[in-house]
Image (spheres, rainbow, N blue to C red):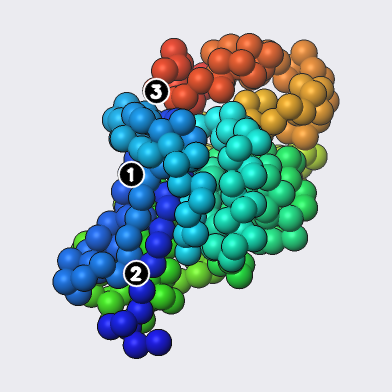
């Protein structure tokens, strides 16, 4: 069909309380730019929530939304669910049935940040590939094993599309725009919003070689961390990690103190606890299973270490950790002190 006569893409963005404002706005901005540059409505969107009215974002800002029931009978081309904290709170029959209705009508359904949790809970990602923000990957994998999870920035699996959020939301939208309206329009929109390099599908969330500001830890440190991250449930002894990293244990200790600011043992413990925290706050797994899945043989040791890192024991965090980040009384990554 001639782009000049093509009907506008009808897009619905469904947000949940404490959604990520930056990712959502970043997703919409390339479409705004394309409309402006072309002087016509290539993409039309509406922002809705289940209840409608003011919906708070995770940064405290509020956006006005239309209620889901008001748009249930529409026939959108694409629906993007944008969620961040506590996606498990959005499990209503109305929401699930409406998403299924749109799916049966042929709409493309997508998730932004943790929006994939909502699609997966409705059964709309069974047998599909998807992604979520890396902080939530472990929890998603435990909760929805029928979905093939990746650590890509975004995934297009037919009429199911997902994005990890953050700055990747701009790449996500530009690639959608490229598919619907071609390279010329997508490139013009990218230039207009000063997005100088559009990352393609298959790009990873965290590239190992360099930090975002260009600093890089030595290869031995990166290799050691990679081995640690691959062995969270059954931790490797530090001498074995040192051998795999290609240095002596003493040299690895010096490198970690210089470039990471803590010992390898403490770093290893902390990333296991970070994994545990995701499972504690984002799943209903028994805490004894969480401890084992994070490499702690002793429940007592697990609880004590967890409280030292996060300021409260896992049983309390299971409740308080579901409160959005900005309302918590403690930081997620409180600096640890080696005993």
Q: Residue at left 36%, top 74%? A: 7
The answer to whether any part of residue 205 appears in the image is no
Separation of marks 2 and 3 at Cα, in angstroms:
38 Å
Write down the residue under mark 2: 8
Q: Pinpoint residue 132: horizontal percent, then vertical percent.
A: 56, 49
For the residues bearing labels 1 and 3, Cβ distance under 8 angstroms: no
Q: Nearer the viewer, residue 230 or 114?
A: 114
Vertical side of 66 occupied by 172: above or below: below
The residue carrying pointer 2 sits among few (fewer than 14), some (14 to 19) or many (20 or more) residues within 10 Å by Cα, namely some
**SS state under label 3:** helix
Separation of marks 1 and 3 at Cα, in angstroms:
15 Å
The N terminus - image quarter: bottom left
Tell which circle, 1 or 3, labels the residue nearer the N-terminal end. Answer: 1
Q: Residue at left 73%, top 27%? A: 284
The C terminus - image quarter: top right
- Whether residue 195 sits left or right of residue 53 in the image: it is left
Q: Residue furthest bottom?
A: 2
Residue 22 disc label: 1
Write down the residue under mark 3: 326
Q: Residue at left 61%, top 70%? A: 158
């Amino acid at each position: 069909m001639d782009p000049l006569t093509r009907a506008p893409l009808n897009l619905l963005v469904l947000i949940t309380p404490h959604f990520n404002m930056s990712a959502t706005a970043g997703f919409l901005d390339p479409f705004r730019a394309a409309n402006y540059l072309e002087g016509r409505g290539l993409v039309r969107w509406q922002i809705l929530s289940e209840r409608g009215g003011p919906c708070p974002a995770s940064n405290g800002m509020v956006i006005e939304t239309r209620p889901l029931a008001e748009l249930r009978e529409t026939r959108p081309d694409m629906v993007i669910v944008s969620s961040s904290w506590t996606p498990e709170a959005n499990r209503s029959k109305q929401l699930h049935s409406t998403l299924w209705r749109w799916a049966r009508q042929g709409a493309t359904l997508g998730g932004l940040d943790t929006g994939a949790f909502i699609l997966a809970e409705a059964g709309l990602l069974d047998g599909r590939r998807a992604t979520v923000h890396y902080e939530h990957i472990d929890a998603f994998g435990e909760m929805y094993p029928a979905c093939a999870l990746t650590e890509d920035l975004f995934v297009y699996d037919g009429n199911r599309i997902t994005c990890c959020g953050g700055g990747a939301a701009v790449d996500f939208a530009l690639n959608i725009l490229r598919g619907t309206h071609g390279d010329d329009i997508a490139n013009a929109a990218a230039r207009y919003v000063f997005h100088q390099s559009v990352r393609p599908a298959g790009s990873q969330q965290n590239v190992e070689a360099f930090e975002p500001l260009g600093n890089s830890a030595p290869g031995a440190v990166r290799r050691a961390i990679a081995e640690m991250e691959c062995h969270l449930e059954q931790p490797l002894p530090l001498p074995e990690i040192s051998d795999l990293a290609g240095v002596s244990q003493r040299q690895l200790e010096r490198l970690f103190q210089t470039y990471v600011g803590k010992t390898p043992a403490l770093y290893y413990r902390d990333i296991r606890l970070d994994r545990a925290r995701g499972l504690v706050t984002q799943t209903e797994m028994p805490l004894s299973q969480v401890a084992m899945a994070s490499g702690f043989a002793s429940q007592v040791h697990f609880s004590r270490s967890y409280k030292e890192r996060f300021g409260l024991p896992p049983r309390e965090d299971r409740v308080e950790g579901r409160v959005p980040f900005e309302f918590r009384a403690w930081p997620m990554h409180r600096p640890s002190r080696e005993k």
